[in-house]
Amino acid sequence: MKKIILNECEYELIEDHNGYDREVVEQKCTDYFKPYDYIIGDWSYGKLRLKGFCDKKNKIYKKENDIARKENYIKENCAYGCKYFVLKKI
């Protein structure tokens, strides 16, 4: 898998459904995402949207950002057939 550095954190690109664009992700990703274990990025109307997700052991864990619900999030909150990717913090 591909390793990526964002805001001094190391990530692994674990899924890429034609959605990962390094330049756009680097511009869009801020320190806000540091506490999250995963970042999901999806494209809607030509714009990249990012959302942080966690494992249950993370202190900021909430049901709505549970990585186990990733498929549900993509199905219910992303445009049908959209391009998306998943980054996992190493």
Image: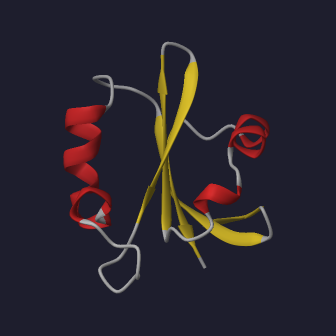
Describe residue 77's horizontal placement relative to residue 1 as left or right: left
Q: In the figure, 52 relative to 35: above or below?
A: above
Describe residue 11's horizontal placement relative to residue 80 as left or right: right
Q: Residue extending furthest top?
A: 45
How far across and down, in percent of the image, does residue 47 sit?
Answer: 57, 21
- In the rendered image, is residue 16 in sight? no
Residue at the image point whose x is 78% and y is 62% from the top: 7
Looking at this view, is 18 or 5 the one in front? 5
Q: In the figure, 82 relative to 1: above or below?
A: above
- In the rendered image, is residue 3 in sight? yes
Residue at the image point whose x is 51% and y is 68% from the top: 36
What's the image's color scheme? secondary structure
Residue at the image point whose x is 72% and y is 71% from the top: 9
> Which quadrant of the structure image shows residue 11?
bottom right
Q: In the figure, 9 relative to 70: above or below?
A: below
Q: Identify the image quadrant of the C terminus.
A: bottom right
How far across and down, in percent of the image, does residue 53 sit?
Answer: 40, 61
How far across and down, in percent of the image, does residue 50 sit?
Answer: 52, 42
